[in-house]
Amino acid sequence: MHGQAEEWRREGRSVGCVPTMGYLHEGHLSLIRQARRETDRVAMSLFVNPTQFGPTEDYTTYPRDIEADCAKAEKAGVDAVFLPPVEEMYPPGYSTCVEVTGLSDLWEGTSRPGHFRGVATVVTKLFQIMKPHRAYFGQKDYQQALVIHRMAEDLDMDLTVVVMPTVREADGLAMSSRNAYLSPEEREAAQILPRTLRRAGELIQAGERDARALHDALVAFIRSEPRATVDYVAVCHPETLTPLTHLTDQALIALAVRIGKTRLIDNNLLTVGAPPVDSHNRPVPPAIP
Ligand code: AMP
């Protein structure tokens, strides 16, 4: 892969890279297609990275289908698939990691200690190997994209991080390889995630500006679905990810919810704008039943 990327660069071609853990869906393919539009050569990595999974997480059961993935990748316009064995990425004696402090400690980082260290380290290695001019990530993993963007800037990595919108199923559920774990009943219950994000938009539109009140309303809303357990609901600043107290300008709403044993995440970036007022210019309180 390294030799191929170097050859492309020597030929004067721009290189796009799409890191994935495989079990490809339209979300992944949207990144590939964007890379295809913006760069001369597209490399996709397919690597279920053990170091970003916690000891009790789903590393061993993570869905895998390499042949189907390669066929989909080729059809979407990938020029090379990088499929390294774990021992090649982390040979005996491997000792180095990359840690993006601060951003990695919140939300997903709190729920999954060490997760972003694993992500930042493997993505650094993938960048070294695939030598991209542009690297493509999905907004579905908003915090991950922010961590990688920070890392690329801090470590003077000579590439552009591109973040593409979340691709959703017809009913709004964000596409995810982990959706494959859901039973039909759980798949139905999983609609609570996009519904909660819609609810957040409605509450803000109706005038809610108190971040705590919004958070509590969203938690209660998720709890109305018996199969759902809230991991976190973040009402936070879109760049620093620190919790907001009062909503102005823009707010990131990010959720982690367990449906049965499956942990799903989703998020939406909302523009807050001015609160609604009545004919006497008095603020109208939110009135969503
Ligand atoms: P994964 O294979 O889950 O590690 O995801 C690989 C890349 O695809 C990451 O940059 C994800 O953010 C992105 N991705 C995953 N799901 C979606 C989606 N539904 N829409 C857009 N991008 C996605």
Image (cartoon, grey):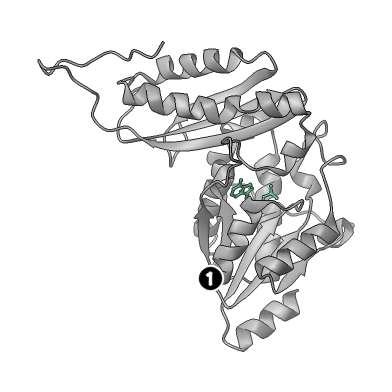
Q: Quadrant of the C terminus?
A: top left
- The quadrant in which the N terminus is found is bottom right
Residue 189 placement (x, y as % from top left): 67, 23
SS state under label 1: helix
Q: Nearer the viewer, residue 136 or 189?
A: 189
The x, y position of residue 151, in whole percent, is 55, 54
Q: Is residue 91 left or right of residue 247?
A: right
Q: Quadrant of residue 96?
A: bottom right
Relative to 197, say whether 46 is above or below.
below
Out of 122 and 81, give the one closest to the viewer.
Answer: 81
Which residue sits at x=75%, y=68%?
81
Q: Which residue does the numbered mark 1 point to in the structure image?
A: 37
Give the farthest residue toward the bottom.
11
Residue sticking out furthest to the left: 280
Type of amino acid under label 1 = Arg
**Where on the picture, by quarter, is residue 175?**
top right
